[in-house]
Amino acid sequence: MQKRQFAVSEEEQALRLAGLRVTPQRLAIMRYMKGTKSHPSPEMVYDHLKPEFPGLSPNTVYQTLHSLEEAGLLRRISMEDNVYRYDANVEPHAHLVCRRCGRVDDTNGYLEPLLHELLAKGSASTSWDIIAMDCCFYGYCDDCRERPDALRGE
Amino acid sequence: MQKRQFAVSEEEQALRLAGLRVTPQRLAIMRYMKGTKSHPSPEMVYDHLKPEFPGLSPNTVYQTLHSLEEAGLLRRISMEDNVYRYDANVEPHAHLVCRRCGRVDDTNGYLEPLLHELLAKGSASTSWDIIAMDCCFYGYCDDCRERPDALRGE
DNA sequence: ATACTATCTAGTAATCATTCCTATGTCAAT
DNA sequence: ATTGACATAGGAATGATTACTAGATAGTAT
């Protein structure tokens, strides 16, 4: 028989590597973040996990997301509505933000070279120490564009 | 003698063109916004004008900035700290944000062609209706980089 | 296995930016 | 000058986030 009694999940490993304790809440939050492309806000994370963890506190979600961000496992992004959102994709990429429904998508990889160039040239063109870049496109997603109601007359 | 009794300021003209009423508060806010490069938050605008307008309400500042933004005279930008900031420079350009002191500068014009290209390619590479783009560089400004205290050890 | 200790969680209260509500005041067209 | 629509100011309300704290739990040494 194989010696794989303690199958250590990818998430658990990442937590340990970051020097963070492994708790059920953290594992669940990480699993959710890794499995979604919707760039959830703390509130969305909380709502999603509340059924699984009835005693979960919003506070824990805030703190966990913050710890994971500090550990480099998540990226925090700020949109126009002053609500934080988190992204498990740490690679440099830009975001599409819908002005109507608030949805946030990733831009496709096609832009990546340009983003790298922008970061490089941006860093080179200033005396500041640049350590990160964030780029957002604002507009209307496919769903919202097709529904003229409450959009812009027409 | 010349017939220039009613020297209409640039700001007044812009307000009228936008269909907004001309009030002392609005003129003052516009003047301040045009004269600064510091991308003030509503609070900063309020603090700056309070001496001149002892009765000024933060509310008025919020509303006025909002009206001016809707009229296209200002641009609202969102940084990492979930505090709104406003920019009288409506031309497309990116921002430098200091992670330590919060200062916000404009990037120099050198990046403009790249930003235009990014907006064009970004719009072309998605089915969404893109109407705006925002790009921020995060790091440490000259002052904060030179002061190691509370920065990052060293 | 047990005990210990640092860290984590949850719950409440506090904070901060922003918006809502409304009475009063003011601009500008007649 | 009169008037009606829009602005302002002030206080209360909202909503996201953080602070504080007591109790629970993970990880480690025994």
Image (cartoon, coloured by chain):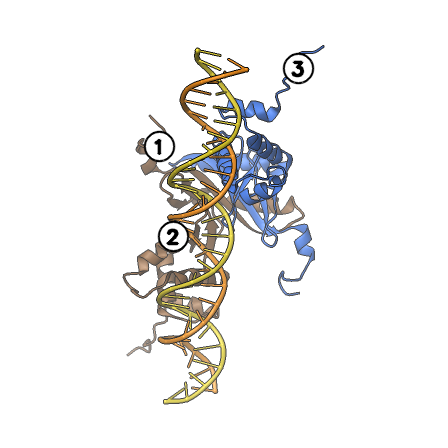
Chain colours: A blue, B brown, C orange, D yellow
Q: Which mark is residue B151?
A: 1
Left or right of residue A41, residue B17 in this image? left
- Whole-percent x, y for residue B137 in the image: 46, 40
Residue under label 3: A4
- Which amino acid, mark 1? Leu
Q: Residues within 10 Å of mark 3 (few under 14, many from 20)?
A: few
Question: Which residue is nearer to you in this view: A105 or A50?
Answer: A50
Residue at x 47% of width, y 43% of height: B136
- Farthest residue in the right direction? A1
Quarter holding residue A100: bottom right
Residue at x 37% of width, y 50% of height: B38
Residue under label 2: B40
Chain of the residue on which disc 2 is drawn: B
Circle 2/circle 1 CB separation < 8 Å? no
Q: Is the C terminus of chain A in the top left, top right, bottom left or bottom right quadrant?
A: bottom right
Question: Given this view, does label 2 or label 1 mark the residue nearer the observer?
Answer: 1
Same chain under badges 2 and 3? The reply is no
Question: Given this view, does label 1 or label 3 mark the residue nearer the observer?
Answer: 3
- Which amino acid, mark 3? Arg
**Dot 1: what SS?**
loop
- Whole-percent x, y for residue A108 in the image: 63, 39
Same chain under badges 2 and 1? The reply is yes
Instruction: Reply above or below: A116 against C2.
Output: below
Marks 2/1: CA–CA distance? 24 Å
Chain of the residue on which disc 1 is drawn: B
Marks 1/3: CA–CA distance? 44 Å
Quarter holding residue B148: top left
Residue at x 58% of width, y 34% of height: A29
Instruction: Reply above or below: B48 against A68.
Output: below
